[in-house]
Amino acid sequence: MIPLAVPFPSHPVLAQRCHAFLERPSAAATIDEWADAMAMNRRSFTRLFRRETGMSFAEWRQQACLSAALPKLASGEPITAIAYDLGYDGPGNFSTMFKRVLGVPPSRYRSL
């Protein structure tokens, strides 16, 4: 299994957004939404985000969604419910991402 890292920035406003995201993760969150919310242009936001977390926004968002999904999988929640809770268009999209990152589909991950 690949350890998941969800690094947090020290920049106060960005850290606050990251914490709020973890409370309600969404795979549909976009760079532009976050940049607008922070009154920054896209380029400045992406630079700040990478400097503060060491990851791109998309990588961080994916790791955050996975870190939210794993306990739900372990507790037996249906994959479809997890996928929709995380903002995926459906369980297929979630399963594809999950397998790409962790090497096994979510259904198999439960049995490991």
Image (cartoon, rainbow, N blue to C red):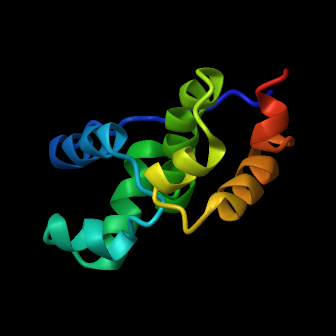
Q: Nearer the viewer, residue 77 or 24?
A: 77
The C terminus lies in quadrant: top right
Q: Nearer the viewer, residue 87 or 12?
A: 87
For the question of whether residue 55 can be seen, the reply is: no
Q: Residue at x 38, y 70 (%)?
A: 31
Q: Nearer the viewer, residue 54 or 76?
A: 76
Above or below residue 3? Residue 63 is: below
Q: Quadrant of residue 38?
A: bottom left
Q: Quadrant of residue 10?
A: top left
Q: Residue at x 20, y 41 (%)?
A: 16
Count of numbered labels shown in the rendering: 0
Q: Position of residue 83 (x, y in %)?
A: 56, 52
The answer to whether residue 104 is left or right of residue 22 is right
Q: Position of residue 18 (x, y in %)?
A: 31, 44
The answer to whether residue 4 is left or right of residue 1 is left
Q: Residue at x 76, y 26 (%)?
A: 110
Q: Position of residue 15 (x, y in %)?
A: 25, 41
Q: Residue at x 36, y 76 (%)?
A: 43
Above or below residue 98? Residue 4 is: above
The answer to whether residue 61 is left or right of residue 22 is right
The answer to whether residue 26 is left or right of residue 110 is left
For the question of whether residue 30 can be seen, the reply is: yes
The N terminus lies in quadrant: top right
Q: Position of residue 34 (x, y in %)?
A: 27, 65
